[in-house]
Amino acid sequence: MRILFITLLLITKISSSQENVELNVNALKYEINDEFERFNDIRDIVNINKLHYYFKSDSILIIENDNVVLSGTNIKLIINNKLQIKDATYNFWTDNPNPEVILSYKVTRVNLILNQNPFKTISGFRGNYNLEIQEYSNDSLIDKYEYKGKFKSFEEISKESVEYKWVVNQNKPEKNYINSNGVYINPEVPPTLKSNYNGLIKEIRKIEKLESKNIRAFIVINEKGKIEKSPIRYSYFLNDKQKSELTKLLIEYTEWYPACVDEIAVKSQIPLIISIE
């Protein structure tokens, strides 16, 4: 995995020469190991490659692929009901930023293939894509490369099916894995929430122009059961003010029982989803 130095999001619109989505019922098979990074929406497993998709309106579908472990990628594709790609975003981050090196990314081309028209039917939705990316350091072009990803929704697929079991087996995490910052990724006893969400949700609803009704983040909980201010990684694209307000609220309004390994409290990282609907 590429190790870079700072998180910086650059949204690149490609509407000046809108690219069309290709429909192919035989779109790339998901359940094989190849050069494509895989993303899915199975919630029953510890899944570091997550698929999220939702309709912003009757004519706009947003597809998000998030990869988070020691470092990660955030990919966002927006398509309209004419099957045109309206926006494409690529972001890479790491937990060890160097403030003197500002990295940004520009998506110059997208090749997206879907197995069906999602505006007609969403069941069994899957696809794959190639992104051509330019990487900039302090506004100077330093690299060009291709990113390949594929995704599949398992929401209506039986847990007893061959493909479902294959994905679960592929995603079996290593227990008590520790990252370079001494944080447990999959501790023996994961942290659990001590407080309730009522006050937190009430305050989150006051944040201006917050479009998402589901807040998704990767948080670090220390040995005392408190969320640490840094790093918190939000998988929904928020502005700096929204991130700052959310971080403050998460720290102030939640208390946790910390993760434990061999009956000793440890620092751990977990995914967090809060529904404010």
Image (cartoon, rainbow, N blue to C red):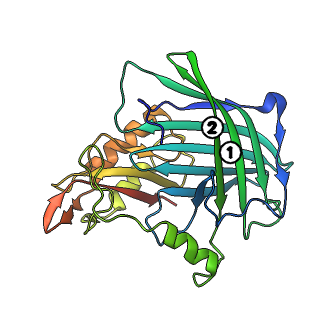
Q: Which residue is at the front of the view, 143 or 244?
A: 143
Residue 194 — which label? none
Residue 173 coordinates in the image, percent (x, y): 40, 65
Q: Which amino acid does the dot numbered 2 rest on?
A: Thr
Nearer-the-camera pick, 69 or 197:
69
Q: Name the residue under label 2.
A: 89
Q: How crowded is mark 2: few (under 14 residues within 10 Å), some or many (20 or more)?
A: many
| Residue 258 percent across, percent down from the top left | 21, 61
**Looking at the image, residue 248 lies above or below residue 118:** above
Circle nearer the N terminus (2, 1)? 1
Who's the residue at 71% across and 38% down the image? 87
Q: Which of the 4 image quadrants contains residue 191?
A: bottom left
- Dot 1 crowding, Cα within 10 Å, few <14, some 14–19, many 20+: some
Labels 2 and 1 touching (C-beta < 8 A): yes
Q: Mark 1 points at which residue?
A: 77
Q: Quadrant of residue 38?
A: bottom right
User: At numbered mark 2, what does the secondary structure look like: helix, strand or loop?
Assistant: strand
| Residue lying furthest bottom | 160
Kind of residue at disc 1: Leu
Name the side, left or right, on which 24 lies relative to 142.
Answer: right
